[in-house]
Image: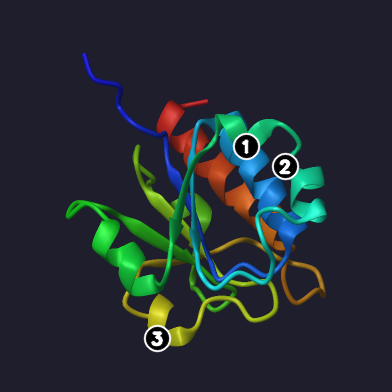
């Protein structure tokens, strides 16, 4: 019997910080999620900061690199469900109804997902009742991925 594939996919659009991507990779390894990186990046995968953050977890991650948003879209299965995360969304991530194999899309640290990319997609937000502008990318990815995994696995 063929393996069912990754529990979910975490997608980082034009990530800027090596340490954040390393931390997201660790989260993906722990959850059995695939990690997709969409260029351009603000760092190199060989950067010291990336290696320090990811430690030895990268070997446990199904890593996909895409040259552009268009290349990423071309690689998606026809039945793929892509959820965009943005502070501009109206619906909370806990209301999504995630399913095995869903794609969780997060934008770059300094600016988030551009409107042209997120507006055609179902868009979710994380609760942020405090005064900060937004969560750190790796924290947001972790919160989103663990809630998706909780819904999928029924924890």
Q: Earlier in the sequence, mark 3 or mark 1?
A: 1
Spatial CA span between label 3 and label 1: 31 Å
Q: Looking at the picture, how far across and down is residue 27, in whole percent? A: 64, 39
Q: Nearer the viewer, residue 50 or 100?
A: 50
Question: Is 153 drawn above or below residue 51 in the view shown?
Answer: above
Residue identifier under label 3: 116
Q: Which mark is residue 121?
A: none
Looking at the image, do the residues carrying marks 2 and 3 touch, with CB atoms under 8 Å apart?
Answer: no
| Labels 3 and 1 touching (C-beta < 8 A) | no
Residue density around tag 1, few if under 14, some if 14–19, many if 20 or more, within 10 Å:
some
Q: Nearer the viewer, mark 2 or mark 3?
A: 2
- Residue 70 horizontal/vertical position (percent): 32, 73
Classify residue 73 by image quadrant: bottom left
Mark 1, residue position: 58
Q: Secondary structure at mark 3?
A: helix
Q: CA distance from mark 1 to mark 2?
A: 6 Å
Alpha carbon distance from label 2 to label 3: 31 Å
Residue highlighted by disc 2: 54
Mark 1–mark 2 CB contact (< 8 Å): yes
SS state under label 1: helix
Say which of marks 3 and 1 sits in front.
1
In the image, residue 133 lies at what x, y percent?
A: 75, 77
């Amino acid at each position: 019997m063929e393996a069912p594939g990754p529990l979910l996919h975490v997608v980082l659009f034009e990530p800027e910080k090596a340490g954040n991507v390393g931390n997201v990779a660790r989260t993906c390894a722990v959850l059995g999620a695939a990690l997709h990186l969409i260029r351009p990046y603000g760092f190199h995968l060989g950067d010291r900061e990336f290696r320090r953050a990811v430690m030895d977890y990268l070997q446990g991650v199904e890593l996909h690199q895409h040259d552009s948003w268009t290349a990423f879209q071309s690689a998606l299965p026809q039945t793929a469900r892509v959820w965009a995360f943005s502070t501009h969304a109206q619906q909370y991530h806990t209301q999504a109804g995630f399913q095995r194999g869903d794609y969780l899309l997060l934008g770059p640290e300094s600016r988030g997902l551009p409107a042209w990319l997120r507006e055609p997609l179902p868009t979710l937000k994380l609760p942020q009742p405090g005064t900060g502008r937004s969560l750190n990318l790796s924290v947001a990815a972790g919160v989103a991925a663990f809630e998706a995994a909780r819904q999928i696995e029924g924890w």
